[in-house]
Amino acid sequence: MAKRMALSVLAISSPVILLTFFWRSAAGEVLFSLLAVIFPVALIVLGAQKGGRLGPLFVPLAVVLLELVAGVVAMLALRGRVLDGPWLWGLPLATAIQVYGLFLLPLLVVALSYALSFERYGLRAEDLEELRRRFRQGDPEEE
Amino acid sequence: MPQLANPVVIATALVYLALVLAIGLWAVRRTRNARDFFIAGQGIGVVVTALATMSAAFSGFLFIGGPGLTYRLGIASLFICFPVSFTAGLICWTVAKRLRLLAEVREVFTVPDAILCRYRSRLASGLAAIAVVAGTVGYLGAQLLALGVMIESIFGTRELFGDRSLAVAMAAGVIVVLAYAVAGGMVAGVRTDVFQGALMAGAAIAVFCYALASGGGLESIARRIATSEAFGPGFLDPLGGIPVLTAMGFFFVFGVGSIGQPQTLHKFYMLDDPRKLKWLPLVLGLSQTLVVLIWLGIGLAVPALVAAGKLAPLNDPDYAAPLFLLRFTPGVLAGLAFAGVLAAIMSTADSFMNIAAAALVRDLPRALGRRVKRELSWGRLAVAGVAIGAATFAYLYGDLIALLGTFAFGTFAAALTPAIAVGLNWRRVTPSAATASIATGMVVNFSLEFLARQSFLPQLPKPFEHSGVLPAAVALAASFTVLFAVSGWTGKSAGDEIDDDVAAVMDC
């Protein structure tokens, strides 16, 4: 399910992104901006799923997706409101969303969810041993 | 480039160069075969892999070009480097584990090697090798040219050598890099990368903190810029200073396209235990994030200084970082930062020399159905040949090299990303689809970049000139589109054509 969904998103998004480059309009800009952040998350889902399932990874990856999409929507909505809009942690809100939301926050969510799910959804010791037992070649001779 | 020659900067640079050479010499006796030379004997840990990956991925552009770009385009330019927050996880989830496991069951040293294993297509692997060589010539030439300019500025060689100064400085830089790259290969490369990566991170953190403190804090800096006539509020608007398609195009290309960078992917083969990948996204992501701080710090501090009238407006934005370091930071910090720039340039150059040599000695001959005997000896020769060739080319045709260097990232991204990111995770991607995708990425990116930048044939069109669309973004989307379209036509039984060991790696 997760794999099929990720592949569908990627297969549909690719030509749509291409079309937005030729379809010069505000709607095209918004569509491209959203797909630009959805696309990498779909790639993560494609790589992270095991047997078509995401299991507990669904939650952190959904958080990352929602956070990136919300960040882009907020930045688009706050365009042109640097001086008269709210400020957060030393920056105008839109810039703060870019720096803290798109830059710093995904690092912790993505990296920690990778590490914490590694034993189950990354590489299990028994899977590695099985792979080595079945297919490993001898070390090459020294030159 | 302003002259940097002062005793502290010169002394720091000399100490740095001596340490790099010492590490290189230490590694020479540990390089015994092609496996050592190209993938460091597959014997490095997670911290070394992370620092080596980071230092190979980040060139001198991050220290010099990045702040200059922010001065010119505003905060939107940071969309180039901000995807580093998730690219480490993206790469590890999509390709790193499978590339490393391929090296567990096959003799795989390079990205074209992996493509050959996955698709059993010499054409696809050969095209990937051509993409690697084409991108490398530009990237490496640009790095060696930048290295020459930095050495010339730091040591003031223009007064000694006059018009030949740049040639002498480039030669000196190439000799130092070759001294460890030829003799020690990647064993020397990754050890120097660790030192260079740590230096880059240390310099970046120190300069970032100093930049913010000297400007009175982040909010004070930001308000000064936003209320100035020179920059105005648009400078701080993430989607205001440049077209949205450019800003988000940076995010798309430098986020998704990071999967196709061979200088980064090459490092995953070197990890001693595939299960150590567990902590790689955290260590790599953190180290990248720390180094990016220098772009953010100087990128905001210099406009704030100009806005406050403490610095004259810059004629050339690329001087933003050198001027800030020389005029507004203590000598030791400036020395550390310039050593960090040298480290960033040299670590990237060293990685590109190695992957270009591997492409010439392994990938292209294999694509032609031949194998080179004595790969270690030929590899050493190829590293020297590639470095001297790229340096000569860069010296003679500096503008062309700069042009090639700027779109090397896009070439790698568009040509290699779909074939490996989707191909290593979905069995229905066929050899024809991978071949068509790699060819599409290369041709579209090269054609659009050439048309956008050439000036000697004014009658040729300049596509996307006014819309702000990045050629690399078009090429990347086109390459993915072709991969899915051709797989849809040809891929019904593609899974049967994958070797058992490769299929097992894909299922792991």
Image (cartoon, rainbow, N blue to C red):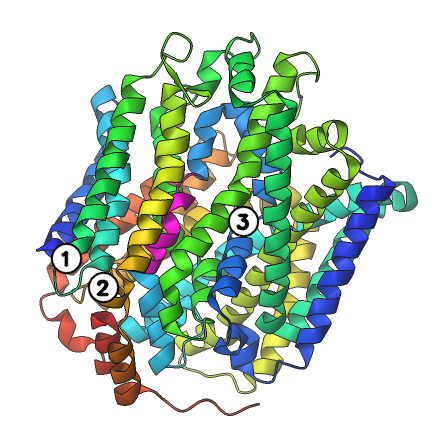
* Along the viewing direction, whichever of B390 and B148 lies nearer the viewer: B148
Task: Identify residue for label 1.
Answer: A55
Nearer the observer: mark 3 or 1; the answer is: 1
* Along the viewing direction, whichever of B271 and B63 lies nearer the viewer: B271
Say which label, 1 or 2, has the lower sequence index.
1
Nearer the observer: mark 3 or 2; the answer is: 2
Position in image of residue B327 (x %, y %)? 76, 27
Which residue: 58% across, 76% down?
A: B379
Q: Is residue B98 left or right of residue B70?
A: left
Marks 3 and 2, how far apart at CA? 30 Å
Magenta extent:
B82-92
Marks 3 and 1, how far apart at CA? 34 Å
Position in image of residue B163 (x %, y %)? 84, 43
B118 to B81, vertically: above or below: below
Identify which amino acid the numbered label 2 is placed on. Answer: Tyr
Identify which amino acid the numbered label 3 is placed on. Answer: Phe
Task: Identify residue for label 3.
Answer: B58
* Along the viewing direction, whichever of B475 and B302 lies nearer the viewer: B302
Question: Do the residues indicated by labels 1 and 2 lie within the same chain of the protein?
Answer: yes
* C-beta proximity under 8 Å, tags 1 and 2: yes
Q: Is residue B56 left or right of residue B508?
A: right
Which numbered disc covers residue A121?
Answer: 2
